[in-house]
């Protein structure tokens, strides 16, 4: 929607963490009855065009959300103009975003867990190489951040 706030989540591959962050924020936005443009992307290009990792799909499904239609894409320079906020899942992603950002971006860059009181400065750990419990922890973190982001966007 024109005039709606917009949020882009960015991780490395756009198949594990940022699709779950996108799903969590879409869910909270819908529950709050507000209009927000939500998307996700990766700093890397390995998985472009692919759906989310099956373990991320399963975790979202546990919360009643179907993310199987999401498709990975790489973050682009236009994203810094299109979005109000770009939220990195870890500090390495944030450093990469700062490196590729245009000089005067419209988007405000932040670290996801800086939005959650008590978890400031922490990374959302990459669950790619671990078991399903890593995806549960990712969901807990991204859903806490999504609730805070909705509160921020309402203010
Ligand atoms: P994500 O996880 O950044 O949370 O999507 C990863 C997915 C794939 C790879 C790394 C991280 N990979 O190296 O292929």
Image (cartoon, rainbow, N blue to C red):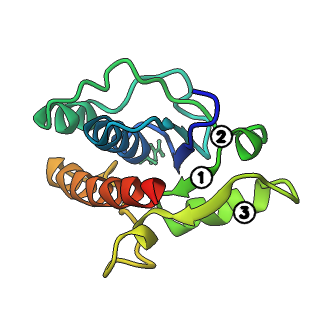
Left or right of 59, for residue 77: right
Q: Could you say which is closer to the camera, residue 115 or residue 3?
A: 3
Q: Secondary structure at mark 3?
A: helix
Instruction: Residue 79: name its quadrant.
Output: top right
Q: CA distance from mark 2 to mark 1?
A: 10 Å
Side of 59 where 113 appears, left or right? right
> Residue 34 at what x, y percent from top left?
39, 38
Q: Is residue 43 above or below residue 73?
A: below
Residue found 21% across the figure and 57% down from its top: 140
* Direction from residue 24 to residue 43 in the image, left or right: right
Badges 2 and 3: C-beta atoms under 8 Å apart?
no
Numbered tag placed on residue 98 in the rendering: 3
Pointer 2: what residue?
75
**Mark closest to the chain's N terminus, 2 or 3:** 2
Q: State the residue at coordinates (31%, 26%).
A: 67
Ligand 1: give its quadrant: top left
- Marks 3/1 in contact by CB < 8 Å: the verdict is no
Q: Quadrant of the N terminus?
A: top right
Q: Position of residue 126 (x, y in %)?
A: 37, 56
Based on the displayed image, in which of its 4 quarters is residue 22 positioned?
top left
Circle 3 residues within 10 Å: few <14, some 14–19, many ≥20: few
User: Gap between marks 3 and 1, in whole Å?
Assistant: 11 Å
Q: Can you tell which of label 3 and label 1 is closer to the viewer?
A: 1
Q: Secondary structure at mark 1?
A: strand
Q: Along the polypeptide, which appears first: circle 3 or circle 1?
A: 1
Report if the CB atoms under discs 2 and 1 are less than 8 Å apart: yes
- Residue in view at x 14 percent, y 30 percent: 64
Is disc 2's CB within 8 Å of ligand 1?
no
Pointer 1 residue: 86
Counting residues from the N terminus, which is met first, the one under dot 2 or under dot 1? Answer: 2
């Amino acid at each position: 929607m024109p005039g709606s706030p917009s949020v882009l989540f960015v991780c490395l591959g756009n198949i594990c963490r940022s699709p779950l962050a996108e799903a969590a924020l879409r869910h909270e936005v819908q529950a709050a009855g507000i209009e927000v443009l939500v998307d996700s992307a990766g700093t890397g290009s390995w998985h472009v065009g692919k759906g989310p990792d099956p373990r991320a799909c399963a975790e979202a499904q546990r919360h009643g959300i179907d993310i199987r239609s999401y498709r990975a894409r790489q973050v682009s320079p236009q994203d810094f103009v299109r979005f109000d906020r770009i939220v990195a899942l870890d500090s390495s992603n944030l450093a990469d975003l700062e490196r590729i950002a245009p000089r005067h971006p419209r988007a405000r860059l932040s670290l996801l867990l800086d939005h959650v009181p008590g978890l400031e400065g922490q990374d959302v750990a990459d669950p790619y190489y671990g078991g399903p419990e890593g995806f549960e922890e990712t969901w807990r973190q991204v859903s806490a951040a999504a609730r805070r982001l909705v509160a921020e966007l309402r203010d």
